[in-house]
Amino acid sequence: MLQQTQVSVVLPYWSAFLARFPDVAALARASLDEVLAAWRGLGYYARARNLHHAARVVLQRHGGRLPEDVDALRALPGFGRYTVGAVASIAFGRAVPLVDGNVARVLARLFGIEGPTGDAGPERRLWDLAATLVEGDRPGDWNQALMELGATVCRPEQPACLLCPVRGRCTALGSGRVADIPAPKTPPRRRALHLALAAVRRDDAVLLVRRDGTGLFGGLWELPGVECEPGTEVEALRARWPQLGAPRPLGRVERTLTHRALTLDVFAVEGLEPPDGARWVSAAEASTLGISAAMQAVLRRVFEDRSPPGGRPWKSSRWPRSRR
């Protein structure tokens, strides 16, 4: 949960998630919908899908106990180099390195490693250093100490160098280049993603479809939609579903993601036949499904609209407010 997400945001989700899924077996036996619903609001939903998939693999192949073998850990879905190092060292006391953003910053300043820490050359040196340094009696404590040092002392901005226990050995501090090391990363180039969405209603329910299990928002529920160029939304909807009546605009939702600039234009429509796997969902039912924050904002507009096509009034329903 902490990947790309702040501790203050994660804590309530973590407590609720463990209360709902107290062990590997409970997580493995839950449906993907249940897991994604518990994750909603945290974003980066591939993490939840991998966690669920990994729990099932652990239950099937390892009797419900996380394997101590490093190779077996690497084989679990979603277990990359950092996660393997964290679990192997902290949970099982194995001398396996880890490098996250905090550790990378500490090691780069301590040893004077030039260049952005995510580039291939610096990253290889950082992992080599981490592998050398983790050897010892308490590898889990060592790895946690490096992470904590980076989070609380060797901060990206305004580092507390006077409090640092290794300041006497720090290459960046000795050369007066703490502010320059590590070098800043090149910000990701965000690709514009524009979608036209069709809001189809029946009584107090709206038609939702589920995205494929991989990629952006994989496995989540959403309104039927089509990718298009700005200004071509109606044409794109009619090209995808020729039987549609006159789409009526309900508004626009915009979100900035790590690699996407997302724009969602929403239209109330009639005449769209439910595709395979689609379901009619009320506002209350939608609150129990895995739905992205952007789609939650879209559905809020749809459920609050009181002028559906064909003059059929909504029944009394209210979209639940986010807990965040």
Image (tube, grey):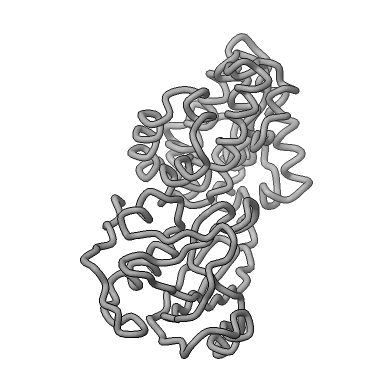
Quick check: 259 above or below 267? above
Quick check: 69 above or below 266? above
Please tell me in which quadrant of the rendered image residue 85 appears: top right
> Residue 137 vs residue 21: left or right?
right
The residue positioned 58% from the left and 29% from the top of the image is: 55
Q: What x and y, as percent, mark residue 284?
A: 30, 55
The residue positioned 41% from the left and 85% from the top of the image is: 249
The residue positioned 51% from the left and 25% from the top of the image is: 145
Quick check: 315 above or below 67? below
> Residue 68 vs residue 32: left or right?
right
The residue positioned 38% from the left and 31% from the top of the image is: 20
> Residue 91 vs residue 60: left or right?
left
Residue ranking furthest to the left: 316
**Which residue occupies the foreground of this view, 250 or 189?**
250
Q: What x and y, as percent, mark residue 299?
A: 38, 67
Residue 110 appears in the picture as rendered: no
Please tell me in which quadrant of the rendered image residue 72 appears: top right
Residue ranking furthest to the top: 137
**Which residue occupies the foreground of this view, 302 or 177?**
302
Q: What x and y, as percent, mark residue 49?
A: 57, 42
Quick check: 94 above or below 224? above
The count of marks equals: 0
Q: What x and y, as percent, mark residue 226?
A: 59, 75
Residue 151 appears in the picture as rendered: yes
